Image (cartoon, rainbow, N blue to C red):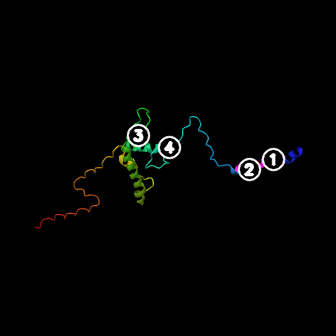
Amino acid sequence: MTLRLGYCLPVLCTALLSLPPAIAQNAPTTPPVAAPAPPGARTPYKPKNLKVLPDNVDLRKVMRQFAGDLGVECEFCHTAPDPVTHRPDRASDANPVKDNARIMIKMTDDLNGKYLTLLAARKDTDTITCGTCHRGEKHPSIFVAPPRPEGNRPPGAPPAAIAPAATPPAK
């Protein structure tokens, strides 16, 4: 029996030593499991219902900019918080002002990306924002040109013909 064990033991050891690399080669690849978040840590906010803003935008910064440019609070475009849960539903499209805001966002993007880029002397810092027109008002004021005093010619008009000097009457 010891003779058989003497022959089998080296074969068994060799088989056992070659087994782990073989298992590792055929093991299914599974993605590493992420470590659980520490207690009290907040998960990053994933915005929903972004139709005109890019996914990687700093949403809080952009929304604060909009609110400042229009002189409004969040509920101007978004629905008011739920009376039961007291939580706002920022993704809701129930407020029609939100659709108008999306149109205005597209308009300013077009102005900055398509039209202002055509100007030769434009600087990258010269961009149009909501504040360009709204200037802290919900609805931008209509521009009314100030009245011009009588006798002023419009800009670019040729100067009026100079009347000939009155000649003294002949004697």
Residue on which disc 1 sits: 12
Mark 3–mark 1 distance (CA, rounded to whole Å): 73 Å
Q: Which residue is mark 2?
A: 21
From the viewer's perspective, is 53 left or right of 12? left
Q: Residues within 10 Å of mark 4 (few under 14, many from 20)?
A: few
Task: Residue type at mark 1: give it.
Answer: Leu
Three-letter residue code for mark 4:
Lys
Residue nearest the observer in this picture, 18 or 130: 18
- For the record, the magenta segment spans 9-24
Residue 40: name its quadrant: top right
Calculate the distance from the C-alpha at mark 1 to the C-alpha at mark 4.
Answer: 55 Å
Q: Which mark is residue 46?
A: 4
Q: Which residue is mark 3?
A: 74
Q: Secondary structure at mark 3?
A: helix
Badge 2: residue crowd in 10 Å (few <14, some 14–19, many ≥20): few
In primary-sequence order, the first of circles 1 and 4 is: 1
Q: Relative to residue 122, is residue 27 depicted above or below?
A: above
Given this view, does label 3 or label 1 mark the residue nearer the observer? Answer: 1
Q: Quadrant of the C terminus?
A: bottom left
Residue at point 41%, 44% (across, down)? 66
Where on the picture, by quarter, is residue 96? top left
| Residue at 70%, 51% in the rendered image | 25
Distance Cα–Cα, label 1 vs label 2: 16 Å
Q: Amino acid at mark 3?
A: Cys
Dots 3 and 1: beta carbons under 8 Å?
no
